[in-house]
Image (tube, rainbow, N blue to C red):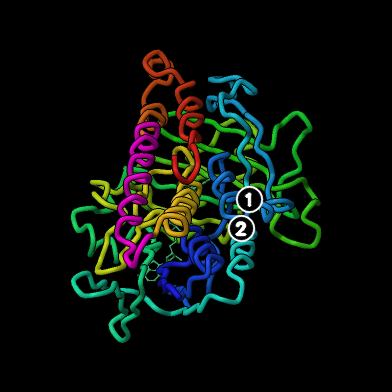
Amino acid sequence: MRTAVVVGAGVGGLAAAGALARAGWKVTLLERDDRLRPGRAALVLWPNGIRALRALGLAGGLDGISTPVPSAGIRRPDGTWLVQPGVSEVESPPVVVHREDLHDAFIAGLGDQVDVRGGIEVQSARVRRDRPAVGDGRVMFEADLVVAADGPDSAIRRRLAAASTFASAGFAAWRAVIPWYRAPELPADVALHGETIGGGQRFVYASLGERGSAGGSTRGGIYWVATVPGALRPEPAAGQLALLRRWFAGWHAPIAQLLATTEADDLVQEPIGELTPLPEAFGVPCGPGGYALIGDAAHAMPHHLAQGASLALEDVATLQTVLVGGVTGGTLGPALVEYGRLRRARILRVLQHSKKAAAVLQTRGRLAASIARVNPRTLDRAAAASTEWAGPTG
Ligand SMILES: Cc1cc2nc3c(=O)[nH]c(=O)nc-3n(C[C@H](O)[C@H](O)[C@H](O)COP(=O)(O)OP(=O)(O)OC[C@H]3O[C@@H](n4cnc5c(N)ncnc54)[C@H](O)[C@@H]3O)c2cc1C
């Protein structure tokens, strides 16, 4: 029986551990936190991410936990339209899902075949001996395959692709879900999803289900993401919330109401950055086995296109396909090289779209001048183009 060690229990790691276990591999999942905890807030999944979930046999789990996000257009802070709603080039609407719900679906997909070890922070990776192995300073975990799903600061990537580092993109971002019982009551003509940009800042919001639809659960509500130029803020969360209310003061409804009903405990502050340069290889043979870098460990990028989780799921679907269908003889090396070839080409395309989106979003100064230079429909086109993924072998 083939063996795998998956490092990191985020979206990518959980999906990879489940996929390998379902394909008959003996899987050990290592996570530095004591418990498998979901990331907080919510995520948008695009049609490509949903296609990847389908390839992994997990799309059924989205039923009942996801809400479609119709094309909402893009507005200026005063509420006037930059891009009218309903004219998107994206093939079908993305969905928004609470991360705790997605986490539960992935945990259910692990089955009982995965040996889950919490409280293990991987610090080293062995690349010169017979088989790959990772260690936390006390124990080495050896396997045919090590999947590095340990996020943007990946310890394994530091060993395999030392030149790649996570560099700030010059933004900080905050996400929150306001549970329905606390969410503002809004007039019927105020949409519960939207996107507004101005002066280098961006505010995106979407509802998770309809008010009351989450029953006794606190997981429904209104999700929002605020992006602001500058570094992470050192203040406690209450101070960060006060700053956000000031920065977005005067923006059209319901932005002020959403910030007013957000509590400091709802806030998740995150650095925005990208891997520079991109690792040369996402699949690294080692003896008869090797390493696969997936998700943010392989290609962390700014969240402008909200593609990080969808790309991690594409990685897993591709890895599953090349490993299950494409391994001949005793060695994983050729399958891992093929995995890296397919994924690196795809990620380079998405990075190009992301840079186009960044050019619109990062434009500061007088908006009128920036619109003359950059067509805001570029954002929609970049979003649509980045969903074009032909499937695990494309
Ligand atoms: C503001 C913001 C909004 C975003 N919005 C979206 C969106 O709407 N849609 C979308 O698709 N993407 C979005 N993203 C990106 C998305 O969140 C990430 O791309 C995605 O979560 C990456 O998943 P991952 O599994 O690769 O890594 P992570 O989720 O970072 O998981 C890594 C895991 O590895 C563990 N770990 C780390 N180091 C070690 C170690 N040394 N040993 C053991 N375990 C370790 C961590 O504890 C964690 O559990 C957004 C990102 C930001 C910042």
Marks 2 and 1: in contact by CB < 8 Å? yes
Q: Earlier in the sequence, mark 1 or mark 2?
A: 1
Reply above or below: 76 against 179: above
The amino acid beneath tag 1 is: Val
Does 392 lie within the magenta span? Answer: no
Ligand 1: which quarter? bottom left
The image quadrant of residue 131 is bottom left
Side of 71 where 118 appears, left or right: left
Residue topped by disc 1: 97
- Image quarter hosting the C terminus: top left
Reply above or below: 14 against 373: below
Residue range in magenta is 328-354
What percent of the width, then of the height, locates residue 69?
65, 37
What percent of the width, then of the height, locates residue 362?
37, 31
Of the pair 228 and 304, the residue shown nearer to us: 304
The image quadrant of residue 106 is bottom right
What percent of the width, then of the height, locates residue 147?
38, 64
What percent of the width, then of the height, locates residue 123?
29, 74
Reply above or below: 91 against 168: above
Of the pair 98 and 182, the residue shown nearer to us: 98
Side of 224 where 183 appears, left or right: right
The label number, if any, that marks residue 102 in the structure image: 2
Of the pair 186 and 204, the residue shown nearer to us: 204
Side of 40 where 28 appears, left or right: left
